[in-house]
Amino acid sequence: MAMKVVTNNANASTSANGSGKTLFFRLFAETKGAVRYQEVEQDGTPTDAAFVAVGSLYLRKSWLGKGVIPQAVTIQLTAE
């Protein structure tokens, strides 16, 4: 699977051809070196625990770039 991180948040919707999913995350907490995001539905409401695909997502601050902490992250997963 390939992963593309898009730093704008528009839970999991399936692509038109059914080969991928889009997951939505909102900023939950910051640590010294990472930012934690929690999986949410597309409208921003919390995802029911029975339906989460990932749950929590941690991104290293060094990977995001200095001073760049998006409030929401969208990840598109596609099968290859």
Image (cartoon, helix red, strand yellow):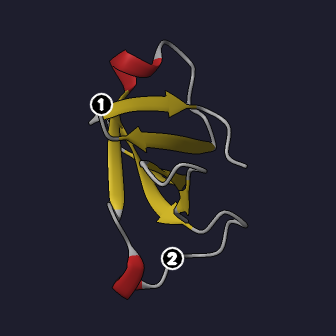
Badge 1 marks a residue whose secondary structure is loop
- Report how many numbered discs are placed on residues in the image: 2
Q: In terms of depth relative to the viewer, which is nearer, 29 or 13?
A: 13
What type is the residue that disc 2 sits on?
A: Thr
Specify whether 68 is left or right of 76: right
Badge 2 marks a residue whose secondary structure is loop
Quadrant in the picture for residue 1: top left
Q: Which residue is mark 1?
A: 33
From the top left corner, tell me how far across and down residue 3 is, in percent.
36, 32
Is 36 drawn above or below residue 34 in the view shown? below
Q: In terms of depth relative to the viewer, which is nearer, 5 or 60?
A: 5
Residue beneath the point at 42% across and 48% down: 19
From the top left corner, tell me how far across and down residue 64 is, in percent.
45, 21
Residue beneath the point at 39% across and 40% down: 78
What type is the residue that disc 1 sits on?
A: Gly
Quadrant where the C terminus lies? Answer: top left
From the top left corner, tell me how far across and down residue 69 is, in percent.
56, 31
Rendered image: mark on residue 47: 2
Is 1 drawn above or below residue 41 in the view shown? above
From the top left corner, tell me how far across and down residue 27 is, in percent.
54, 51
Is 3 drawn above or below residue 55 in the view shown? above
